[in-house]
Amino acid sequence: MREMIIEFEPNEMMRKECKPIFGIVRYYEILETLKIEWEHGICVDLIEFSLQDHLSIDDVDHIGDMEILSVLRSEGGKHTCLIKHKEPEGSVDMFREFDLDLIFSQPFILAPDKCTFSVIGEQKSLNRFVELMKGQASRIINMTLKKAAYRRKDVLSVLTEKQKNIMIAARKYGYYDYPKKISSEKLSKRLNITKGTMLEHLRKAEGRLLAEILAGYS
């Protein structure tokens, strides 16, 4: 497997599509892709962004077609959020073309004048990804390739067994879905613990996972 980092200037079509996004943020970076449904054009990501000067995070619930599910951290003008993105009906077929058995890694940054994408995969898939990117670019600025060995880390290892079990159950029963499939009251009853104790475990677990994912970021 190889890792490819590609930097490019977006073409006019991509600039137009992204205009609603960059009217709200200066840039955004995908820190972690948590879920992708290629068939339906849906993805859930952990992202970091900086808002335009005239906006406050309290005023924003969408960034273009990205819905903010939760604001996890705000510090120094940067905001880390969990978002859900749903491709417009007319763009789902194009979205499916990116189902190339690739691992999306970092950096993965989108800004008005330059985008930087990093992916890991077999050469055939990488070649196809480049062809798709050329359709979005007015100019390829730089592209690098190197050998890569992807070793997925078990981030849940930073949690206690109690925290891990509660978070897994919360995901299983739809507590993190949007809209929620189960309320905190009903989930606590399923787990046979008080609502306050359950929410405390979830908050601590979320904090630990966020710290692990963002390790090295100032």
Image (spheres, rainbow, N blue to C red):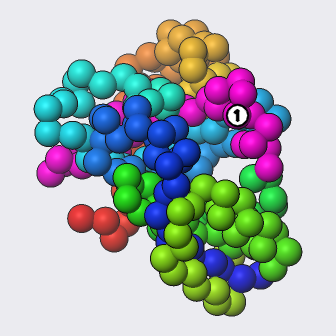
What amino acid is labelled 1 in the image? Ser
Q: Is residue 61 above or below residue 171?
A: above
In-image side of 113 versus 164 (left or right): left
Residue 211 or 49: which is nearer the viewer?
Answer: 49
User: What residue is rendered at 79% in x and 44% in y?
Assistant: 96
User: What residue is rendered at 58% in x and 38% in y?
Assistant: 44
User: What residue is rendered at 53% in x and 63% in y?
Assistant: 138
Marks counted in the figure total 1
Q: Which residues are magenta?
A: 68-97
Q: Residue furthest bottom?
A: 147
Residue 181 visible to the viewer = yes
In-image side of 151 versus 12 (left or right): right
Residue 218 or 93: which is nearer the viewer?
Answer: 93
Crowdedness of circle 1 by 10 Å Cα count: few (<14), some, many (20+)? few
Q: Which residue is mark 1?
A: 91
User: What residue is rendered at 57% in x and 81% in y?
Assistant: 143
Q: Tell me residue 39's x, y (percent).
A: 82, 35
Q: Is residue 34 above or below residue 128?
A: above
Quarter of the image for the N terminus: give it.
bottom right
Task: Please say whether residue 40 is one of the residues in the magenta stretch.
Answer: no
Element type at mark 1: helix
Res 216 quadrant in image? bottom left
Res 152 quadrant in image? bottom right
Q: Tell me residue 111's x, y (percent).
A: 38, 55
Quarter of the image for the C terminus: give it.
bottom left
In-image side of 139 versus 42 (left or right): left
Residue 209 visible to the viewer = no
In-image side of 193 versus 62 (left or right): right
